[in-house]
Image (cartoon, grey):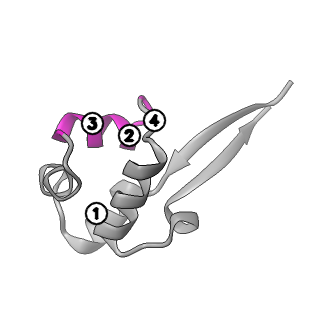
Amino acid sequence: MNDIEFQNRIRVARAEKRISQGELAEMVGVSRQTISSIENNQFCPSAKLALLICIALDKKFEDMFFFEEHN
């Protein structure tokens, strides 16, 4: 059976905008550790938080979050 993981491109988008984890966290109202956990796929953000991150980084949801299939 295939395993599907929810992935993100937050780290890349932050680098493009030159925003630190702490700065992004402050923009969306969470801790820096939460952003780190999301970037490292240790925590799955709520729909609201995912959308706030997209707005803060000026990216479309489908450009930031995606599913990756592993065999």
Mark with earlier residue (1, 3): 1
Q: Which amino acid does label 4 sit on?
A: Asn
Q: What residue type is labelled 2?
A: Ile
Q: At 38% across and 56% down in the image, what residue appears?
A: 10
Q: Relative to 62, say whether 39 is above or below.
A: above
Q: Using the image, tell me which numbered label, if any, was put on residue 41.
A: 4
**Callout 4 secondary element:** loop
Disc 4/disc 1 C-alpha distance (Å): 16 Å
The residue tagged 1 is 14
Q: Name the residue under label 3.
A: 34
Decide whether residue 24 is among the magenta residues.
no
Q: Mark 1: give few (<14), some (14-19) or many (20+) Cα within 10 Å.
A: some
Q: In the figure, residue 41 lies in which quadrant?
A: top left
Q: Give the range drawn in magenta.
A: 31-42
The amino acid sitting under disc 3 is: Thr
Residue found 38% across the figure and 40% down from its top: 38
Q: Residue at 67%, 45% (x, y): give it.
A: 68
Write down the quadrant of residue 9 in the picture: bottom left
Q: Give the label, 3 or 4, closer to the camera.
A: 3
Q: What element carries label 1?
A: helix
Question: Circle 2: is it few (<14), some (14-19), or many (20+) Cα within 10 Å?
Answer: some
Return the residue at label 2: 38
Measure the alpha-carbon separation of dots 3 and 4: 10 Å
